[in-house]
Amino acid sequence: MGLPCIHCGEDCGKHPIIWDEQPFCCHGCKTVFQILNEKKLDKYYKIQPMSGIRVDSSETGTKYAYLDNEEILEKLLDFSDGGISKIELFIPTIHCASCIWLLENLNSLHAGIVQSYVNFPKKKVSITYKDEEISLRQIAELLSSIHYIPEITLDQMDKKDEKYADRDLLLKIGVAGFSFMNVMLYNFPEYLPGGDQLEALFIGVFGWLSFGLALPVVFYSAQDYYLSAIKGLRHKQVNIDLPITLGIFTLFVQSSYDIISGNGIGYMDSLVGLVFFLLIGKFYQGKTYQALSFERDYKSYFPVAVTQLIDGKEASIPLSRLKEDDVIRIRNQELIPADAKLLSGSANIDYSFVTGESIPVAKNKGELIFAGGRQIGSTIECTVIKAVEQSYLTQLWNQDRTDKDLAYSLNNLMNKVSEYFTAIIIGIALTSAIYWSFSDSSKAIYAFTSVLIIACPCALALTVPFTFGATMRMFGRAGFYIKNTSIIEKLHAIKSIVFDKTGTITMTREAKVSFHGQELTTKELIMVKSLVSHSSHPLSQIIKDYISEESVYEVEQFQEIASMGITGLIDGIKLMAGSQVFVSGKGNSEAKHAQVYVNIGGELKGYFSIENKYREGLSGIIQKLQKRFKLFLISGDNESERENLKGLFGENAQLLFNQSPTDKRDFIKNLKADGQVLMIGDGLNDAGALMESDVGLTIADDIYSFSPACDGIIESSKFNKLHGFIRFTETALKVVKFSFVISFMYNVVGLYFAVQGTLSPLIAAILMPISSVSVVAIATFSISFFARRKLL
């Protein structure tokens, strides 16, 4: 044996290729190593040593030349606008944490790549890039040069979503099932009294028939287990597929020997049945995950609504009801919910939610605007040209993250347990086989294979995702929508809660409004309404609803300055609305309620006084939360309501006013030194603070405003259950621990019978998926039971 390759771990043989005193098995591995070191990406090898894949050839030639074809590009790309394009590529060689880290740092290999995001379960990478600096062909060649070769198929070009993996698995189950039924038939006499008296000729014929039927099962139906086990060993990992592989080949070799030597028909029935039931269990688990994914993407989707125009009048409808040819109105900072064409207005689209690039792209009438963009400026009207895809927006939501650390404590713990668990099981199986070889050799094979098959860490590994998945669904049904399951663990760990004021703890639809100053004419009221209609800020919407006039004027050069106010031109007249210092240049005066000042044509007209009504049950929620968490309030408004809020939060509560978005973000950043922080805001002026916090939540009112920066959304009617949602994360963790104990007990009991050599591998194969099913059932029903009991 020679030295292991520093890149892929393969044996370098007698004559390794040496570069920088490091051994390589081939020039391809050396080239990849050189590229990563040149770009200072050597952390790739620190995350998981020898994590690369052997490179057979780094020459691509004209292999990807077809990607320069514009027609093909149009079919392949998910997004292309403003010099930025986005594509999702399937890369089957993604296999470990190092792969994820490298593929999410592709921008270090080429500056033209804006960002990349890996979907590990699907082995896909989503890449956003600048057209002028790098082409799709160059990206494919770059990936090939580090041996992450993308598979680009005609079906991807046609946007088909056929599940070839499911079809392949079903075919393998079909082959195994057919063989299992026939082999059982050939072995039927063996199950009956006197079966051993069967003539040797029949035994030999049945044995060879069983052998022939077992071959496609062993070398086709079960091949995924071998490939997974070999891949794990190459990377110095012992996974669950290794003991399964050992069990299958032990039964096959022993049975083949018995048949060839004429000593009987072996254990072919157990072997074929073992593979059949293993595949059935695998199919069930896959379908369960798909069901979770479907409910996540479609049924429990967060409640984003959109403003539809029907006969010129606004109507707020759920996103799910939006269809082709609907006309929608998009205000400043609102999200484009579906691919649409611009009908009217000045569109400047910020695609940072989609591409990571925040430079707005100007659009003219009739041009296409992609879903996921955000309008910057005045209100626009669009015609929907493609029905909304909630799963696409959900994918964008999960992709938009600043926390790249995926090693959450519970999942990390389970993975470690599973890794050592498998090694221990192999040791127990070998010990059992050796013991029975000397004591009763007829039990040695059964003991060895049964131990390998029945003791499965799958149940342990499934505990966290299924328990948290069930919790996530129950939250969704109760009106609390979270980005992903990791938020549950983070919610459980929070130490401080920070509230925004306007639109978060106040009810914008039930505020009392009055105007103080010069009496506004009907035209001036319409002008003010026209201006505030372009803003999605809660105070702007309150004033818009307060002014009853229906007609509106066209607003030009609209601008909105966070925490300050809005401006625009109507018929050449400049309008301003916002804080006193923004509109008049004078310092904010003390007042009991929120004030929005108005300036028309350079003349200060007065201000709207807005008496907020706090959300129902706010006092009770704060009292409950104060017992466990440090509470803070931070607002961009003036101190007009300080005394009212002191009565709610307490005399010693920290209440901060006149805070800019930057101030809010810095406050959260400093507060995190004392533990994990939950921020609850409206998502408009709070985006930076929401992203900085460990968990960011927004409140969804009657007209919904979705902020990609948030980790979760609570329906406004369910706000009084906030404390219950946070407490329920404790219940979820208890269910995880309980399921873990059940899984452990199952393995102990199973091993007790298996080591005695009396348990058939066939029965073990049936019991193994049952353990996974039981964990899923316990997690699902326990979470459902406790959710109903706690009135979620």
Image (cartoon, rainbow, N blue to C red):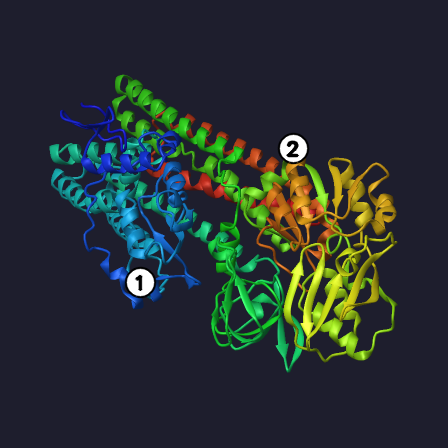
Looking at the rendered structure, the secondary structure element under dot 1 is helix
Residue at horizontal 46 percent and vertical 50 percent from the top: 288
Looking at the rendered structure, the secondary structure element under dot 2 is loop
Residue 695 is marked as: none
Residue at horizontal 66 percent and vertical 68 percent from the top: 534
Q: Is residue 495 above or below residue 221?
A: above
Residue 355 image offset from top left, x and y in percent:
46, 55
Say left or right for 762 vs 267: right
Residue 345 image offset from top left, x and y in percent:
58, 74
Say left or right for 49 vs 56: right
Q: Amino acid at mark 1?
A: Asp
Q: CA distance from mark 1 to mark 2?
A: 48 Å
Q: Is residue 521 above or below residue 538?
A: below
Say left or right for 638 vs 101: right
Say which of 28 and 527 sits in front. Answer: 527
The residue wearing badge 1 is 155
The residue wearing badge 2 is 675
Mark 2 nearby-residue class (10 Å; few <14, some 14–19, many ≥20):
few
Say which of 220 and 98 sits in front. Answer: 98
